[in-house]
Image (spheres, rainbow, N blue to C red):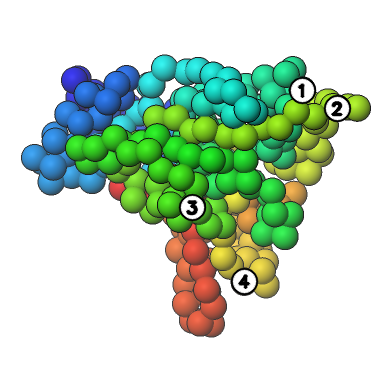
Amino acid sequence: MKILNIRTKKFSWYKTDHEFANVIDIKSAEDYYEAIKYAQSKNLRCYTLGNGSNTYFRKKKISTVILRNCLPDFIRPAGEDLFEVSSSTNVPKLLRYLYSEGREGPFNLASVPATVGGAVAMNAGGGKTEGIFISRYLKSVSYLCNGERIEAKVSELEMGFRKSLFSERRDCIIISATFLFPQKEFISNPVTERLDWAREHQDLKIPNCGSVWRAFCFPLLRLAESLFRTSPAYFSKKSLIWISNKSSDHRHILKILRVVRFFHLVTLRKCEHEIRIVD
Ligand SMILES: Cc1cc2nc3c(=O)[nH]c(=O)nc-3n(C[C@H](O)[C@H](O)[C@H](O)COP(=O)(O)OP(=O)(O)OC[C@H]3O[C@@H](n4cnc5c(N)ncnc54)[C@H](O)[C@@H]3O)c2cc1C
C-alpha cells in the first residue's frame, strides 16, 4: 500500500486546489484493510472518494485519509434481470449499457457524473417529489467496513433522501451493488433525452457539485443569493440550490455555506448539506 501526497484540483467537481497528505488507491480488499489500519494508527479520519461530484474540501491542506476508489470496473448480468455492477463504474456508462440491452433503469441520472458507489451512497435521484432514486432498483450491496466484508440487503442500508449509511459513515467502501433492471422497450433514447434536458435546465459549464442542500428554506437562499452575485462562487442562475464556482480557492464556497447556515440558525430553520464536506 502506498500513501500518496498529491496536489490536485481533480478530487472535487468544484475544481478547487488542495494538497492531500494521505491518498490511498483502493484496488483490492487488502488495500482497504491496510488503509484503515494506517488511519487508525495515525488517528485520522477516512473518506471514500468516488468521482468527487458531491464532495467539497473545506481546507487547503487535507489530512483526512482519502480512499480513492480504484476497484476494477465491471457490469455482470446475474440472471433473472439482476446485474452486479462495480462501485467504480460510471453511472452514465451503466445507463448507456442498460439502454443498449433494452433494460429499465434510473435514466434521470444520465447527466450525473457519479460512480455507482457514490450514487448508492448518496441515494442519487430526482427531487423530493419526483421520487425516482437509485434505491428503487437496488437489491443488495457488497461492502467493506473495518475488518469485514458484508453483504447487505437494501433494507439494511438506511437509504433516505440523498443519504445512506455510507454517506454518513464515510469509512466503508462499497465494492459492488446488485440491481434489478427489468426488460423494457424504448420508443426514444432516455439517455440523450436526459442530457438535452440537463443542458437546458442546469448550469453544466461552470464547475459545480449539483445540489448543495437537502434541507433548506427557499426565501433564505434567495436572500443569500443577492449577496454573492459578484463573487467567484455564486448561486447558479438556473437552480438556486446549486453553487457555481469559478475559482480554485475553496474559501469562496465556504463563505456562501457559512452565510446560508447563519441565516437558517438565526431564523431557527432547518439547514442540511447534501454535499459531503471533508477537512
Ligand atoms: C453536474 C452535476 C449534476 C448532478 N445531478 C444530480 C442529480 O440529478 N441527482 C443527484 O442525486 N445528485 C446529483 N449530483 C450530485 C452527485 O453527482 C451525486 O451525489 C453522486 O451520487 C456522487 O457520486 P460520486 O461518485 O461523485 O461521489 P463522491 O462525491 O465521490 O462521494 C459522495 C459520497 O459518497 C460516498 N462514496 C463514494 N463512493 C463510495 C463507495 N464506493 N463506497 C462507499 N461510499 C462511497 C462518499 O464517501 C461520500 O459520502 C450532481 C452533480 C453534478 C456535478
Say whether disc 4 or disc 1 marks the residue closer to the N-terminus.
1
Q: Position of residue 80 (x, y in %)?
A: 63, 27
Q: Residue furthest front?
A: 80
> Can you identify the residue that label 3 sits on?
155
Say few, some or many: other residues with alpha carbon within 10 Å of mark 4 (under 14 / 14 to 19 / 20 or more): some
Q: Position of residue 142 (x, y in %)?
A: 40, 34
Q: CA distance from mark 3 to mark 4?
A: 30 Å
Q: Quadrant of residue 111?
A: top right
Q: CA distance from mark 4 to mark 1?
A: 41 Å
Q: Measuring 49% from the left and 47% from the top, which residue is drawn there?
A: 154
Q: Amino acid at mark 1?
A: Gly
Say whether disc 3 or disc 2 marks the residue closer to the N-terminus.
3
- Mark identifier at residue 217: 4
- Mark identifier at residue 186: 2
Q: Amino acid at mark 4?
A: Cys
Say whether marks 3 and 1 touch (CB < 8 Å).
no
